[in-house]
């Protein structure tokens, strides 16, 4: 397995989130002309080919143009990632687990590239760059002398760079800010736990607690290779049944219901609970399930520090101690699994990991937009035609607010739930599912909806 060398690690440590924010802010000028980048940006078209030419002896990289490209790619990679997840879910409804796995992996990849871009890390085929604090683009290690010779390609460098980022304290800072149950940053929820202790989590430990062990993403790449390049039915396969497939799809969507105060309230509540359990184990060396009274007292202390109302505090107490909603959401429980690629549930494990990583990437992008003062009107040149292209609305008939996109989903979920109840004692086929719910299934494969309201537009 490939590893980062010392030069590559040194370069990655120079990447700057602040530099990306400054760069993104200057994109306001081309956005006023309804474009992400000026036409004169040398990387706007044929980016990989141009970058290869600019890294040859006697030539040089256009730092400003490349930094602009990396900054613009943040939200675009994110939206594309949600699109890949939607297409994966569409294949899932056909019982096509192999193509779902293939597309699910690319949803993971785009989520990672989006997240890395917000940190100032740009991935470009076989030569990659960071934007440093001085707004200069530096190569990640020594540039290869020939194309694809002796350097890490897109897939390898993405997962290595993501793992390197997750093991730095700076990853904790962004995760602690973008996860906001009840509109309160995770950092504030956990402040009481860390007071008086030496415990300070790193991003990788949080991600793992949430079901996102980054090492499994490399395994997902290997599984994608099998789905992409090998014939799929040389050996007998067992597929996930239609009813279970419907249940997974419904449960995935139900945790993404937006609220007035948060685009990801339901999922973030569960991520908070897992984070508090990790923190309790770290500072007490005790498992919450084995010491429920002590854990409950810790949670009470956390809630008291937040000055919540009595009724709200009691609800949170019951939730965080698992007296209500005891189980984790299916995408978290499935993301933790590492079944063989032949297992009928393997592809939904890939989709679950993609979903969680997309939530993190979307939060990082939304934070970037907030800190640079960009909102709905600034990006309407992009999101309005994007919604038309993806079939979310007719031209000129976009929703009043992008959270209104939930209304169609809510109706589709209601009908899906009723269908599952009516077929609970049966074994409906995929053909039956698609015939009965042919008008709701496409809606539940439109994950771009989540991208739009998740970005806070």
Image (spheres, rainbow, N blue to C red):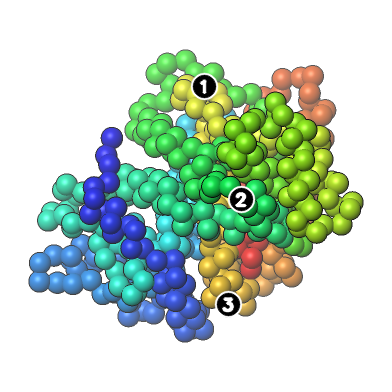
Mark 3 falls on what kind of element?
Answer: loop
- Asked whether 188 or 109 is in front, the reply is 188
- Mark 3 and mark 1 in contact? Answer it, CB < 8 Å: no
The C terminus appears in which quarter of the rendering?
A: bottom right
Residue named by callout 2: 196
Q: Earlier in the sequence, mark 1 or mark 2?
A: 2
Taking the image as shown, residue 450 lies to the left or right of residue 413, namely: left
User: How far apart in space, not on screen, are marks 3 and 1 (Cα)?
Assistant: 46 Å
User: How far apart in space, not on screen, are marks 1 and 2 (Cα)?
Assistant: 46 Å
Mark 1 falls on what kind of element?
Answer: loop
Residue 413 placed where, x, y %?
A: 76, 43
Disc 3 versus disc 1: nearer the observer: 3
Residue 4 placed where, x, y %?
A: 27, 46
Q: Which mark is residue 373?
A: 3
Mark 2 falls on what kind of element?
Answer: loop
Q: Earlier in the sequence, mark 2 or mark 3?
A: 2
């Amino acid at each position: 397995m490939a590893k980062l060398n010392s030069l590559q690690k040194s370069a990655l440590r120079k990447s700057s989130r602040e530099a990306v924010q400054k760069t993104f802010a200057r994109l306001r000028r081309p956005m006023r002309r309804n474009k992400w980048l000026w036409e004169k940006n040398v990387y706007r078209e044929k980016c990989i080919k141009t970058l290869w030419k600019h890294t040859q002896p006697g030539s040089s990289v256009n730092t400003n143009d490349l930094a602009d490209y990396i900054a613009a790619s943040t939200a675009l990679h994110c939206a594309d990632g949600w699109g890949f997840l939607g297409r994966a879910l569409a294949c899932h409804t056909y019982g096509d687990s192999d193509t779902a796995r293939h597309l699910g992996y690319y949803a993971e990849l785009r989520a990672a590239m989006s997240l890395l871009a917000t940190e100032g890390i740009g991935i470009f085929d076989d030569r990659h760059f960071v934007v440093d604090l001085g707004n200069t683009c530096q190569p990640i290690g020594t540039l290869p002398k020939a194309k694809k010779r002796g350097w890490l390609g897109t897939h390898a460098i993405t997962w290595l760079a993501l793992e390197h980022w997750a093991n730095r304290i700076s990853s904790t800072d962004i995760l602690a800010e973008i996860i906001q149950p009840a509109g309160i940053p995770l950092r504030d929820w956990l402040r009481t736990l860390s007071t008086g202790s030496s415990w300070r989590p790193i991003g990788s430990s949080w991600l793992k607690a949430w079901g996102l062990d980054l090492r499994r993403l490399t395994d997902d790449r290997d599984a994608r290779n099998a789905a992409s390049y090998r014939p799929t039915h040389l050996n007998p396969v067992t597929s996930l049944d239609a009813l279970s497939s419907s249940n997974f799809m419904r449960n995935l969507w139900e945790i993404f219901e937006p609220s007035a105060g948060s685009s990801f309230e339901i999922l973030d509540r569960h991520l908070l609970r897992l984070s508090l359990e990790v923190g309790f184990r770290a500072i007490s060396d005790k498992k919450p399930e084995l010491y429920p009274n002590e854990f409950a007292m810790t949670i009470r202390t956390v809630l008291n520090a937040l000055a919540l109302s009595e009724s709200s505090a009691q609800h949170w107490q019951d939730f965080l101690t698992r007296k209500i909603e005891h189980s984790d959401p299916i995408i978290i429980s499935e993301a933790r699994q590492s079944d063989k690629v032949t297992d009928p549930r393997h592809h939904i494990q890939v989709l679950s990991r993609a979903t969680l990583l997309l939530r993190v990437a979307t939060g990082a992008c939304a934070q970037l937009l907030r800190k640079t003062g960009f909102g709905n009107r600034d990006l309407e040149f992009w999101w309005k035609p994007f919604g038309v292209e993806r079939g979310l609305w007719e031209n000129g008939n976009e929703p009043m607010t992008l959270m209104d996109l939930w209304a169609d989903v809510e109706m589709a979920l209601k009908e899906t739930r009723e269908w599952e109840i009516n077929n609970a004692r049966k074994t409906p086929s995929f053909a039956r599912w698609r015939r009965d719910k042919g008008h709701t299934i496409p809606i539940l494969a439109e994950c771009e909806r989540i991208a739009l309201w998740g970005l806070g537009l």
